[in-house]
Amino acid sequence: MSNEEVDVVLVGAGIMSTTLGVFLKELQPHLKLEIIERLPGEAQESSGAWNNAGTGHAANCELNYTPMRADGSIDIAKALEVNVEFDMSRQFWSYLIRKGAIASPDNFIHPVPHMSFVIGADRQAFLKKRHAAMSAHHCYRGMEYSEDHGRIAEWAPLIMEGRGPGQPVAATHIVNGADVNYGALTTDLLNYLKRHDGFAVHFSQTVTHLHRRPGGGWRLDVKDETTGAKRTVDAKYVFLGAGGGALPLLQKSGIPEAKGFAGFPVSGIWLRCGKPEVAERHAAKVYGMAASGSPPMSVPHLDTRIIDGRRWLLFGPYAGFSTKFLKRGSLFDLPLSVRPDNILPLLAVARDNFPLEEYLVGQVLQSSSHRYKALRDFYPNMKEADWEFDVAGQRVQIIRKDKAHTGKLEFGTDIVHSADSSIVALLGASPGASTAVWIMVHMLENCFHEQLVGHWVPKLKEMIPSYGHDLKTDAALTERVRKETAEVLGLHTV
C-alpha cells in the first residue's frame, strides 16, 4: 500500500471541487492539490449537463425565491442574494478567460433570456406585484412584464401557440440571462488545473475512509475501482465536494459538527427535444409556478439548452424519490446514512413534510400521459413524438437538527467544517452550481480567514472586482460589472 502527502485533497471532480482547486492555485500556487473521483471522468454526476437543472440561476425567473409575505407584499431578499452571487461567477469566469485559462466562453455559456410564466388571474396578480418589486431595484433593471398574448408570443412563441385567446396569462422577461453548461465548464477548469505543477487528478478511485492524524490533518484510505489496489493519502486539508456522496464521507470523518445531519434524496426526470425545427423556435428559460408541497427543484420550466454545440429544449424536471444519494450510487445510500444522532431529525422531517412525501409518491406513480399533459399546459401544440424521457441527477436535500433537537428540511446549500477547518463538506443542492464561485469564496472566508486577512484579498479582488462591495446597494458598480463581464462572456446587457 503506497502513501503520499499533499496539502489539499478535493473529493469529487465536479464544478465545486474544480472551482475551489482553481481558486487555491490562483491564491497560493505552490499548494499541492489532488482530486479523487470515483467515476471514470469529471462532471459525470450533478455537474453534467443532462443531470443539472442549475443552468445560470440568477433568480430572475424562479418564483420560489420570491415568496409572498403575510401582508401580500413580495419578499425579493433571497432572489437578490442569488442574483448578485451569480455576478461573482460571471466575474471569476471573465478573469479566467482574460488570462487565457479558459480559451472561449462559447464552450460553456450562451445568452438566453429568462422568463417567468403563469396562468390564471390570481397568479397574474402575483406576478405583476413581483415584477413591480423587482424592477424597482437596480439589479433587475430592464425586466419587462406583460399580460398580452401577442407580446408574450414574441418572447416565446411555443408557449402561446394554440392557447385560448381568453386565457389569463402573464410573463416577465429579462434579456441578460444565460444558459451555462457546468459539465463543459468543469472540464475547462480541470484542464487549466492540469497545466499546473503540484496538481493531480485520479479517476475511478473511491475514498473509503478518513482518519484524523495525530499531528493534524487527515489520512484518506483510497481504493482503485479498476484494479482493486489500495493506497493512503495524507492531507492537511480535505474538501468533500462530492455532491450526494459528501454526507457519508462527512459522517465517516467523525467530527462533532457532522452530528445531526441527514440527507433527503430527490430524483428527477426530464422531457427533452432535440428536433431543430422545434428547438430553434424557443429562445428562453421559462419558469412556471411549483405545485403545492413540491420541492424547488421540481418547478416546471421549458429551457433552452446548448449542449455540445447543439440546441435542445428540456422540460421538467418531474420529481421522484430514490434512496440513492448519487445517480450512479447505491439503493443502500439512504439506509446506511442513518445514525443514532440523525434518527430524530429524519423522523421529524418525515412527520412534518407529509405533503411533500405525498407529492413525490404521486410523481413516481405518474404515467407518461400525465407528464405530457404538464408539458402541454406550457406548450399547447407539443407533439409527443418530438420528445423523449431522460433521467436527471440526484439531489440530496439537507436535514439538520434544529434547536428543539428534532429536524428541519432545507433546500439550500450548507458548508460544514471541523473546528480547525481541516475538513470541509458542501451539502445540499439548489441553487448549487450557479453559485459555486460565491460558495467557494464564502468557504475561504470562513475556513481560511487568516490567509485572507494576510495576503489573499488583493488577488481575490483581481479575480472578482466587486469583492468586498455589496452589489445589492451599489448600482453603479453593478452596472459596470455586468457590462464588463457581458462583453467577455458574450452575454446581453439590459
Image (cartoon, helix red, strand yellow):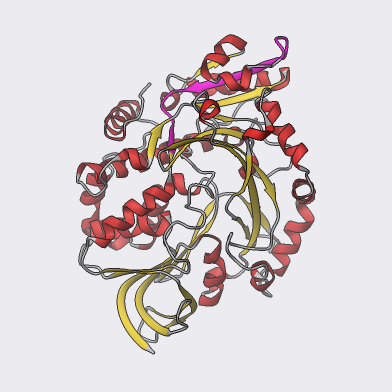
**In the picture provided, is 443 more to the left or to the right than 385?**
left
Query: Is 6 in front, or is 39?
Result: 39
Which image quadrant: the N terminus?
bottom left
State the image coordinates of residue 44 (x, y, percent, origin top left). Answer: 48, 58
Which image quadrant: the C terminus?
top left
Residue at left offset 23%, top offset 69%: 198
Residue at left offset 37%, top offset 48%: 185
Compared to residue 149, the image places residue 197 above or below, namely below
Image quarter of residue 325 = bottom right
**In the picture provided, is 214 more to the left or to the right than 458?**
right
State the image coordinates of residue 249 (x, y, percent, origin top left). Answer: 52, 72
Compared to residue 5, the image places residue 170 above or below, namely above
Residue 444 visible at all: no
Q: Which residues are magenta?
A: 164-179
State the image coordinates of residue 375 (x, y, percent, origin top left). Answer: 68, 32
Residue 43 visible at all: yes
Compared to residue 306, the image places residue 459 above or below, namely below
